[in-house]
């Protein structure tokens, strides 16, 4: 009998469909939409995650995100830095939405398209972001290929 356990297979497959985008008519609200598929479901559902700009700004401040990303993007050529900065902020918002989605799923998700309001799960999302801050920052650096610039190798696309 083996003492090793098989690797745990995730219960849900989550894919970013699109976002972050501003909600039309509500410039203070940003949303991302994810496709979520549970292994036992025949098909997936779309889950819209709404977040208000003030929550994003609070998290940026708590994680010192603006100064952190500016510092890490110094290796990017100045003519490309603005594009990388925008992408870095978009990735940060996507991670906020993703962690809010994970929190929502843990509370119980049904097989139906749903939109999670900006006012729901605020403190739980902020706790998750603060807990995962270093992993989030590390993943943003990987997504931006910053290490390639440090090595003197310019990625083919940003």
Image: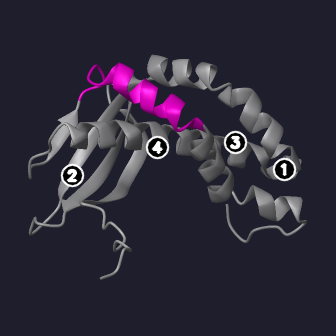
Residue 61, horizontal then vertical, whole percent: 62, 19
Q: Quick check: is 127 in the magenta stretch?
A: yes
Q: Which disc is residue 115 wearing?
A: none
Q: CA distance from mark 2 to mark 4?
A: 15 Å
Q: Is residue 68 visible?
A: yes
SS for callout 1: helix
Q: Which residue is mark 4?
A: 94
Q: Main secondary structure of the magenta part?
A: helix
Q: Quadrant of residue 66?
A: top right
Q: Nearer the viewer, mark 4 or mark 3?
A: 4
Q: CA distance from mark 3 to mark 2?
A: 28 Å
Nearer-N-terminus badge (3/2): 2
Q: On screen, 158 above or below 124?
A: below
Q: Residues within 10 Å of mark 4 (few under 14, many from 20)?
A: many
Q: CA distance from mark 2 to mark 1?
A: 37 Å
Q: Which residue is mark 2?
A: 46
Q: Nearer the viewer, mark 3 or mark 1?
A: 3
Q: Residue at x 82, y 37 (%)?
A: 71
Q: State which region is magenta.
A: 117-133
Q: Nearer the viewer, mark 2 or mark 1?
A: 2
Q: On the rendered structure, is 153 left or right of 83?
A: right
Nearer-N-terminus badge (2/4): 2
SS for callout 2: strand
Q: On the rendered structure, is 153 left or right of 136?
A: right
Q: Determine whether label 3 and label 1 are within 8 Å by CB.
A: no
Q: Determine whether label 1 and label 4 are within 8 Å by CB.
A: no
Q: Determine whether label 4 and label 3 are within 8 Å by CB.
A: no
Q: Which residue is mark 1?
A: 79
Q: Which residue is mark 3?
A: 85
């Amino acid at each position: 009998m083996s003492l090793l356990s098989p690797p745990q297979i995730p219960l849900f497959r989550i894919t970013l469909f699109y976002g972050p985008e501003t909600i039309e008519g509500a410039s203070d609200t940003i949303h991302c939409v994810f496709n979520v598929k549970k292994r036992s479901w025949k098909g997936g559902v779309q889950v819209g995650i709404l977040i208000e700009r003030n929550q994003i700004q609070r998290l940026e401040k708590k994680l010192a995100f603006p100064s952190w990303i500016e510092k890490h993007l110094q290796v990017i050529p100045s003519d490309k830095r603005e594009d990388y900065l925008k992408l870095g902020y978009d990735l940060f918002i996507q991670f906020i939405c993703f962690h809010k989605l994970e929190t929502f799923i843990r509370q119980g998700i049904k097989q139906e398209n749903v939109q999670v309001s900006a006012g729901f799960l605020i403190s739980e999302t902020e706790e998750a972001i603060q807990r995962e801050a270093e992993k989030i920052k590390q993943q943003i650096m990987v997504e931006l290929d910053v290490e390639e610039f440090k090595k003197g190798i310019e990625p083919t696309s940003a």
